[in-house]
Amino acid sequence: QVQLVESGGGLVQPGGSLRLSCAASGSQFSIYPLGWYRQTPGKQRELVATITSGGSTNYQDSVKGRFTISRDNAKNTGYLQMNSLKPGDTAVYYCKSFTPEGGYWGQGTQVTVSS
């Protein structure tokens, strides 16, 4: 019901920045909380940041002060601005719409932080 497509990943050096986008379809996108997760091969997906429909945000301690989650409901798009990137941030990043049924995932976008 909610379709999500991530973009904006790539290869950056430590200390660099990337802005990820999550383009959503669905007429009720604006009422659902949005989250960004990340996952490395063979490991469980972990929550990075969330934003409610009203704009309240939460971050994992490891990214607080470096990452900013936002959304533009008029464009049906969520964002994750990532600054001061570290090698430990390397992962596939996924957005998720937290619907009452359990949520919908995007396909993921690769972020690699390496010198």
Image (spheres, rainbow, N blue to C red):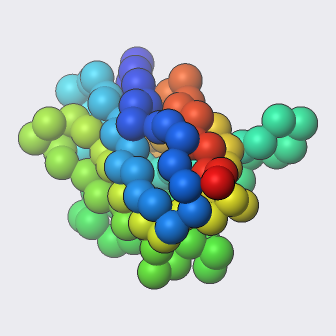
Image point (18%, 48%), residue name: 72
Image point (77%, 42%), residue name: 40
29 relative to 94 in the view: left or right: left
24 relative to 47 in the view: left or right: left
Location of residue 115 with respect to 104 vertically, above or below: below
* Residue, far front: 115
Query: Which is nearer the eye, 56 or 16?
Result: 16
* Residue, far right: 42
Q: Is residue 31 visible?
A: no
Q: Is residue 49 visible?
A: yes
Location of residue 9 with respect to 13 vertically, above or below: above
Residue 82, how many percent across, how many down?
43, 60
The quarter holding residue 69 reads: bottom left
104 relative to 29 in the view: left or right: right
Residue 67, how many percent across, how many down?
44, 67
Residue 63, how many percent across, how many down?
56, 72
Q: Which quadrant would the C terminus be assigned to in this image?
A: bottom right
Image point (89%, 36%), residue name: 42
Q: How many marks?
A: 0
Image point (14%, 36%), residue name: 75
95 relative to 60 in the view: left or right: left
The quarter holding residue 11 reads: top right
Query: Which is nearer the eye, 9 or 37?
Result: 9
Residue 4, how many percent across, how many down?
41, 26
Query: Which is nearer the eye, 24 or 38?
Result: 38
Location of residue 57 with respect to 106 vertically, above or below: below
Q: Which quadrant would the N terminus be assigned to in this image?
A: top left
